[in-house]
């Protein structure tokens, strides 16, 4: 049975999450007034710069690390082919500097706010992504215990060279396969694509201890013992 951990309950109380929600004020025919975009952007920046984002992310990573230690202590690795699945953007790497620039240009880009990949690919050539230290620590712990690492990203396969160089420059190495979305993929959600890849990994005889990502679409669809949802109030990928 797949379990969901690390849903960051505090996120649902923080200004950053609320900033992406509508402030419901009843007027006459049930119309609503959305929150002022300036206030929303300020809340997102404060959520990151105050340290709350990193705190919540670290709490999730520590749960994954605890699970990893428990699995190793039970010595499942002796009789099982173990694996862990990582997402890339806002999981292995942070595009916050890009996102901050994007939010600063909000008036020019508000129609693309939902599309995290547009943000990432639009600014990556200008501002280099950064590593997320707790995730790199988790990644290296998985690797050092001989557990196979698979990476599944929603970036298209045409960006493979860019994605590989980005990960290696930030200190990641030793993964078995980097799966990238086919350029002709046309479904509205990445869930079918990512869950199908996990099924393929499972069918090869691997037991996926956990899958970790910043979007629920990174995680839903089965084939992992546990899933760890990292905080990301900046964009949504269905």
Image (cartoon, grey):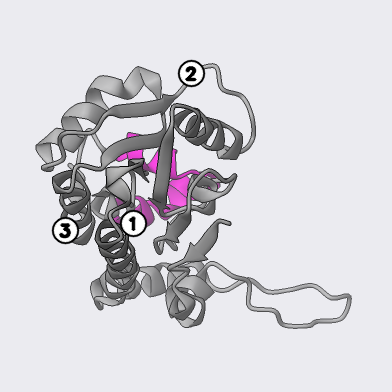
Q: Which residue is mark 2?
A: 183
Q: Which residue is mark 3?
A: 133
Alpha carbon separation for disc pair 3 and 2: 31 Å
The quadrant of the rendering that contains the C terminus is top right
State the residue in front, 212 or 143.
143
Determine whether 192 is above or below 89 in the image: above
Local SS, label 2? loop
Q: Main secondary structure of the magenta part?
A: helix
Local SS, label 1? helix
- Asked if residue 106 is among those painted magenta in the image, a careful observer would answer yes
Q: Residue at x 47, y 68 (%)?
A: 7
Point out the stretch of residues depicted in magenta.
100-123
- The earlier-in-sequence mark between 2 and 1 is 1
Alpha carbon separation for disc pair 1 and 3: 25 Å
Which label was assigned to residue 73?
A: none
Closer to the observer: label 1 or label 3? 3
Q: Residue furthest right?
A: 29
The quadrant of the rendering that contains the N terminus is bottom right
Q: Which residue is mark 1?
A: 104
């Amino acid at each position: 049975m797949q379990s969901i951990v690390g849903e960051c309950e505090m996120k649902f109380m923080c200004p950053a999450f609320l900033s992406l929600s509508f402030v419901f004020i009843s007027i006459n025919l049930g119309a609503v007034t959305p929150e002022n975009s300036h206030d929303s952007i300020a809340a997102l920046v404060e959520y990151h710069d105050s340290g709350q984002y990193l705190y919540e992310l670290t709490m999730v990573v520590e749960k994954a690390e605890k699970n990893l230690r428990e699995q190793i202590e039970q010595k499942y690795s002796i009789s099982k082919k173990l694996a862990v699945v990582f997402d890339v953007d806002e999981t292995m790497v942070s595009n916050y500097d890009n996102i901050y620039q994007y939010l600063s240009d909000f008036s020019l880009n508000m129609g693309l706010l939902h599309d995290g990949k547009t943000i990432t690919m639009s600014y990556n050539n200008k501002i280099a992504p950064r590593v997320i230290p707790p995730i790199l620590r988790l990644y290296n712990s998985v690797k050092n215990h001989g557990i196979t690492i698979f990476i599944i990203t929603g970036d298209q396969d045409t960006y493979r060279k860019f994605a590989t160089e980005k990960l290696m420059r930030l200190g990641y190495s030793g993964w078995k396969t980097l799966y990238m979305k086919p350029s002709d993929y046309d479904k509205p959600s990445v869930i079918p694509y990512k869950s199908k890849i996990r099924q393929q990994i499972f069918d090869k005889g691997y037991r996926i201890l956990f899958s970790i990502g910043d979007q629920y679409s990174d995680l839903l669809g089965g084939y992992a013992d546990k899933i760890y949802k990292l905080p990301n109030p900046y964009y949504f990928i269905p």
